[in-house]
Amino acid sequence: QRNTIPLLAALIDQGYQLSLETSGVCTIADVPRPCRVVLDIKTPGSGIHDQWLADNVGRLQPGDELKAVIADRADWDWFVGWFAETSGLDDVIVNVAPVMPDLPAATLSEWLLDSGLPFRLNLQLHKWIWPGEDRGR
């Protein structure tokens, strides 16, 4: 949205604590801090893997978050490999969520526990509240 950055700045000036969740297709370079950024990492299973800006990862700050929605084991393996090869993420919170109902949350939980990685399991609440409906828009 064209006026997002000025809106964030105005709200920060008024003392609000903000979080901006972004698909990563636009740069986060101008996001005023201390606004927290939640950046989607597009996995191959998303079908839009080539549309997010990888440069955004280097702009993350401590306390910001990454979010990856995992469609299947190939996505999980890709994301784990990507994370291992990406530096500067020690102070970034990492969330993974299953594509429901295709990937059961229990399956992703097992992969997460077996990996020993410091990721958080994040469930897409709209998929639980309105199963089968496209309410995530």
Image: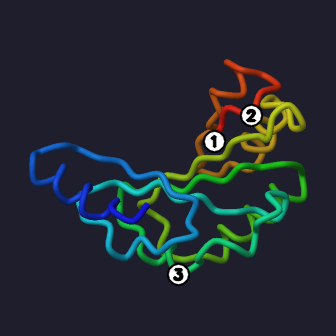
- Find residue 102 and name its label: none
Establish if 68 lies above or below 104: below
Q: Which residue is mark 1?
A: 137
Q: Classify residue 99 as left or right of residue 66.
A: right
Q: Marks 2 and 3, Cα distance to the nearest angstrom?
A: 30 Å
Q: Marks 1 and 2, Cα distance to the nearest angstrom?
A: 7 Å
> In the rendered structure, which disc, 3 or 1, sits on the residue that comes first in sequence?
3
> In the rendered structure, which disc, 2 or 3, sits on the residue that comes first in sequence?
3
Q: Residue furthest left?
A: 14
Q: Classify residue 47 as left or right of residue 87.
A: right
Q: Which residue is mark 3?
A: 55
Residue appearing at x 47%, y 51% in the figure: 21
Amino acid type of the residue that numbered disc 2 sits on in the rendered structure: Asp
Asked if disc 3 and disc 1 are in contact, CB closer than 8 Å, the reply is no
Asked if disc 1 and disc 2 are in contact, CB closer than 8 Å, the reply is yes
Name the quadrant of the C terminus. Answer: top right
Where does the image place residue 5, in percent across and percent down from the top left? 30, 64
Q: Residue furthest top?
A: 129
Q: Which residue is mark 2?
A: 134
Residue appearing at x 60%, y 48% in the figure: 119
Where does the image place residue 26, in percent across and percent down from the top left? 51, 71
Name the quadrant of the N terminus. Answer: bottom left
- Quarter-of-image position of residue 126: top right
